[in-house]
Each structure stands twice: as structure tokens, then as C-alpha cells.
Amino acid sequence: MKKYLLAAGAAVTAAVAAAALAAPATAAPAQDTTSAPVAASVSAAPSAAWRTVRSGERVDAGGGYTLWLTRQGKYWTGPDGFEQFRSVVDGNLDLTRPALSHQGEGTFHSGVYGGPELPGRVEVTDAEGRVTRATLLQLPGRPGWGVWYAHTAPSDHDVSVAFYAADGRLLVELPGIYA
């Protein structure tokens, strides 16, 4: 089942909303691998945790997934070729506070992160505690939001997702539902 989750707020607690949108697919746990962040090429500190991409630039996320960002939000396609969109301008994400969303399709996880804090990292954690560090993408000029993505191992369990500031503080967490 494709999942669309959203959390916003300065506290660690998160408001989570879910909607089923497609044929069944399970959210999957993380592998014991960590993908290193890619340094930004535009007006960021040398150790920036995100990669800066041009509006509309297609990013191969692996596994048949492609992502791209525009000023309106996050677009992506999967192996089925079906184009999907997550808006950042429709009012569903309050970017005046730390915000995080999660879209899970089998072993591929992605979402939007944002808010006034400089982003540090996004981590996906499975029910067994295995952590996968997501890759972060952002448009030039620090628009206050970006996109994250990660691949995890197959599982029948959900995952939790956490967004950290550049200084290491936990900003928002979407808890997993471990049945």
C-alpha cells in the first residue's frame, strides 16, 4: 500500500495522516547501509548534507525511480512509469516549522523535508533498529524545503523517518507502526 504521511512541528511528536492510493505494497525496513550525503554546489557550507539540483533536473534514484523538483514541489516516477506529485505550495506543509512527509512504495521511500532549520540528515529506521541515511536534494537558493529518498530491505513492517538539523538535533519524527 502506498503511504502518504505528514508531520510538522517543533516538538518531536508528529501529526501523521495516511491515505491508501494504489495496489498493495509494503513499507520496508532499512538495511545496515549508509549512503553518504553529496555536497551542494551552490552557496552552501562545504560540508552541506544535501545536493543542489536545478528545477526540473531528473535525478536517478535507483531501482527504476526518478525524482525531480520544481518550485511547486516533488515529482517522481517509479518502475511503472506513473508520474506522481507532492506539493509544497498547497498549504499541507507548514514550512515555518520543521516538516516531514513520507511516501513509501515497497522498498523505496521518499518525501519532503522543510522548515527554517538548515537540514542535516533524514534517517529511515526499521522495526529491528536498522538505520538507512537518505539522500537529500534541494533547489538552489535554499527555498526552505527539499526532497529525501532511500532504498531499504523488504519487510512486512513499517519504518520510522526522522529529520535532523545540521547541528544534529532531532526536528521531526514520523513513527513507524510495528505490528
Image (cartoon, rainbow, N blue to C red):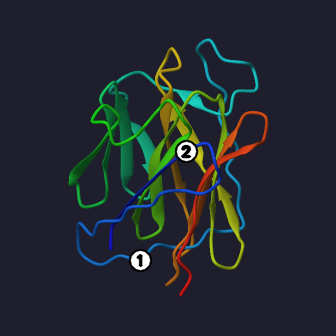
What residue sits right under mark 1 in the picture?
A: 26
Q: Quadrant of residue 57?
A: top left
User: Residue 155's mark?
Assistant: none
Residue 125 appears left or right of 92: right
Q: Name the image quarter holding the N terminus.
A: bottom left
Identify the residue at the far bottom of this view: 179
Write the residue at 65% across / 69% down: 31
Q: Residues within 10 Å of mark 2 (few under 14, many from 20)?
A: some
Check disc 2 and report its element: helix, strand or loop: loop
Write the residue at 55% across / 71% down: 176
User: Residue 9's mark?
Assistant: 2
Write the residue at 54% across / 32% down: 115
Residue 25 appears left or right of 155: left
Q: Nearer the viewer, mark 1 or mark 2?
A: 2
Residue 130 appears left or right of 154: right
Q: Quadrant of residue 102?
A: bottom left
- Image coordinates for residue 139, horizontal then vertical, percent: 46, 23
Check disc 1 and report its element: helix, strand or loop: loop
Write the residue at 33% across / 34% down: 73
Amino acid at dot 2: Gly
Identify the residue at the far right of this view: 167
Relative depth, front residue between 87 and 79 = 87
Relative depth, front residue between 97 and 32 = 97
Does 170 appear above or below 20? above
Q: CA distance from mark 1 to mark 2?
A: 27 Å
Say which label, 1 or 2, has the lower sequence index.
2
Q: Residues within 10 Å of mark 1 (few under 14, many from 20)?
A: some
Amino acid at dot 1: Thr
- Image coordinates for residue 22, horizontal then vertical, percent: 23, 69
- Image coordinates for residue 44, horizontal then vertical, percent: 66, 17
Q: Quadrant of residue 152?
A: bottom right
